[in-house]
Image (spheres, rainbow, N blue to C red):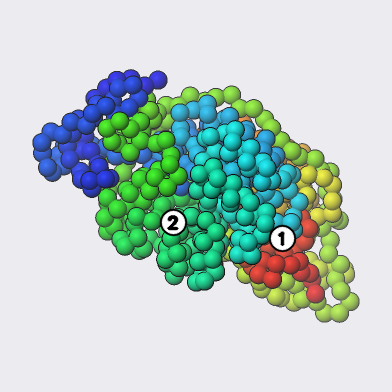
């Protein structure tokens, strides 16, 4: 509950670009007056008051937490709002999943801006649990004014060809005065211009500064992304001095262990440590997303909602207090938000698997395996062709060469698993499995042998969603995710501890990836090139067609 109070601090004004000592008067949840002391320079004895941080693009589901629990962790790091695309749960449950996120998020004062998912399912080349049509999007815009934008338009080929259904979704966003988010990795030059001309306003998928400059040149806002899987901060941060008015920070995907440690505050720290102007950095972190998405978030001006943070200095940005609507919601790294009851909603119906389900018969002639090559910290993959390793008439993993077996198992109904090979995970033993598999969220698993694969997949099936690790010495860990097979119903710190344990066992089995489960979750993401695996087979994201795993 908010209270009337006064705060004396060095107040950061992101409109006048000043930092001056003042007394902030808060009453009725709003900034009623900012009373300068008359000094023109910051007072070293005072803390700093500034607008709260905003994550300009995140899938809350990827934290493995429901929105209310995500908020409890985020406010401790000075985050007061997120622009959240619920297309993960949308792919599992459709509009009912989006409405679930709205209901749960509304139980806390954190300022979630959820979007209407534009691409559910993401492609016709995979099995999702639901579909969100143009009519569904209109329902969300009409009946839920808090649905603030059309979420990332991943079907960039459809935008370029002006596909009728794609353009109808964009038209609805424009009719209801909602911005349209983009998703167009690698799109450059005239294609980027044509994509933006359809009404696309942002992109968070730029891997290089050159790509970002092409998109900035045609009027798009570029989001600098640094999450648990994809990390583009180093590639893009030097654009900030010249283009700060058109940049935002985002995480995209944030696992609970890293969210426990920090959020957008870490990007602010890093940018300032590199010598970037602090006021420009804070404009990117605080003001730009509020203005672009028209968020109901205060920016520390008289009359604004009292959403702001207090930090000790402008180097470390250690958050001392976080306020939302004038209520103190975090202090000295501790969240003061109370937990709320978590309802369970799901869509999971498949049969247990056997080791034999993952066998791949070898051709009679010498065979070549198309191997997915994954990279730490990237969503993109490469294709690497290697001679098949054959035993007893079957193509098998080549563990010493880090060529492991990858499978995607349909979680919505019984179907034969899709099987391929992958390099880059580094496992020497055992298997990992997860029901978090972007974007359709079937079960994705990687392993050194068929028996371990089957056991890991079956642990996920038995839990009706979760992350699992199977070790050859009999150790097994499962982190259940009963909410849509994507999120836990437990408190954030409990989930973070369980995730840390399962991540540690995956690394003990040999994986050198920073976030093995996050990387695994993107190996079925067909809209990111070049080679991925869906429940229907191995998919070439550049040719946009299925290919054989063994030839």
Tell me the residue that label 2 is attached to.
Answer: 221
- The residue under the point 22% across, 46% down is 16
Residue 19: give x, y in percent of width and height: 20, 43
Q: Quadrant of the C terminus?
A: bottom right
Residue 326: give x, y in percent of width and height: 35, 26
* 26 to the left or right of 408: left
Placement of 19 over or under 212, stated as above or below? above
- The residue under the point 45% across, 44% down is 293
Q: Residue furthest front?
A: 175
Residue 545: give x, y in percent of width and height: 74, 67
Q: Is any atom of residue 68 visible in this view?
A: yes
Q: Toward the viewer: 360 or 225?
A: 225
Placement of 521 over or under 345, stated as above or below? below
Per the rendering, the mark at residue 257 is none
Could you say whether the residue bearing mark 1 is in a helix, strand or loop?
A: strand
- The residue under the point 27% across, 32% down is 302
Packing grade of label 1 (10 A; few <14, some 14-19, many >=20) is many
Q: Quadrant of the N terminus?
A: top left
Q: Toward the viewer: 342 or 316?
A: 342
Per the rendering, the mark at residue 533 is 1
Of marks 2 and 1, the one in the foreground: 2
- The residue under the point 79% across, 69% down is 548
Query: Which mark is first along the chain, 1 or 2?
Result: 2
Residue 417, located in which quarter of the rendered image?
A: bottom right
């Amino acid at each position: 509950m908010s209270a009337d109070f006064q705060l004396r601090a060095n107040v950061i004004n992101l409109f006048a670009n000043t930092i001056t000592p003042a007394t902030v008067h808060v009453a009725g949840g709003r900034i009623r007056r900012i009373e300068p002391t008359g000094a023109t320079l910051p007072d070293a004895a005072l803390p700093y008051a500034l607008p709260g941080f905003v994550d300009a693009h995140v899938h809350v589901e990827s934290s493995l937490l429901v929105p209310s629990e995500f908020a409890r962790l985020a406010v401790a790091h000075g985050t007061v709002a997120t622009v959240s695309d619920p297309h993960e749960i949308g792919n599992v449950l459709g509009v009912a999943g989006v409405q679930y996120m709205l209901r749960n998020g509304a139980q806390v004062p954190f300022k979630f801006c959820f979007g209407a998912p534009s691409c559910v399912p993401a492609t016709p080349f995979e099995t999702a649990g639901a579909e969100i049509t143009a009519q569904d999007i209109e329902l969300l815009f009409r009946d839920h004014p808090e649905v603030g934008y059309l979420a990332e338009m991943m079907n960039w080929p459809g935008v370029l060809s002006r596909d009728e259904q794609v353009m109808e979704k964009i038209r609805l966003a424009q009719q209801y005065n909602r911005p349209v988010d983009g998703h167009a990795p690698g799109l450059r030059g005239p294609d980027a211009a044509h994509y933006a001309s359809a009404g696309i306003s942002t992109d968070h998928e730029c891997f290089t500064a050159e790509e970002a400059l092409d998109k900035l040149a045609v009027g798009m806002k570029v989001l600098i992304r640094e999450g648990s899987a994809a990390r583009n901060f180093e590639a893009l941060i030097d654009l900030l001095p010249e283009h700060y008015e058109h940049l935002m920070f985002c995480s995209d995907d944030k696992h609970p262990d890293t969210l426990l440690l920090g959020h957008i505050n870490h990007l602010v720290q890093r940018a300032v440590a590199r010598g970037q102007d602090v006021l420009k950095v804070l404009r990117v972190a605080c003001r730009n997303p509020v203005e672009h998405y028209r968020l109901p978030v205060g920016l520390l001006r008289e009359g604004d909602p009292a959403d702001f943070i207090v930090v000790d200095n402008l180097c470390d940005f250690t958050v001392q207090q976080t306020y939302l609507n004038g209520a103190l919601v975090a202090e000295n790294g501790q969240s003061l938000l109370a937990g709320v009851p978590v309802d369970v909603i799901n869509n999971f119906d498949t049969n247990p698997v056997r080791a034999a389900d993952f066998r791949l018969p070898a051709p009679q002639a010498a065979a070549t395996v198309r191997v997915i090559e994954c990279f730490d910290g990237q969503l993109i993959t490469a294709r690497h062709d290697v001679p098949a390793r054959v035993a007893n008439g079957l193509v098998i993993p080549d563990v010493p060469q880090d060529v492991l077996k990858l499978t995607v198992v349909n979680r919505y109904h019984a179907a034969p698993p899709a099987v391929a090979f992958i390099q880059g995970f580094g496992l020497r033993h055992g298997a990992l499995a997860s029901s978090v598999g972007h974007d359709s969220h079937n079960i994705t698993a990687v392993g050194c042998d068929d028996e371990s694969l089957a056991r890991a997949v079956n642990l996920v099936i038995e839990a009706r969603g979760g992350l699992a690790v199977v070790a050859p010495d009999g150790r097994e860990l499962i982190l259940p995710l009963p909410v849509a097979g994507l999120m836990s119903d437990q408190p954030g710190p409990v989930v973070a501890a369980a995730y840390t344990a399962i991540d540690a066992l995956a690394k003990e089995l040999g994986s050198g990836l920073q976030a093995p489960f996050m990387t695994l979750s993107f190996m079925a993401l067909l809209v990111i090139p070049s080679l991925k695996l869906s429940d229907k087979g191995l998919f070439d994201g550049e040719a946009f067609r299925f290919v054989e795993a063994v030839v």
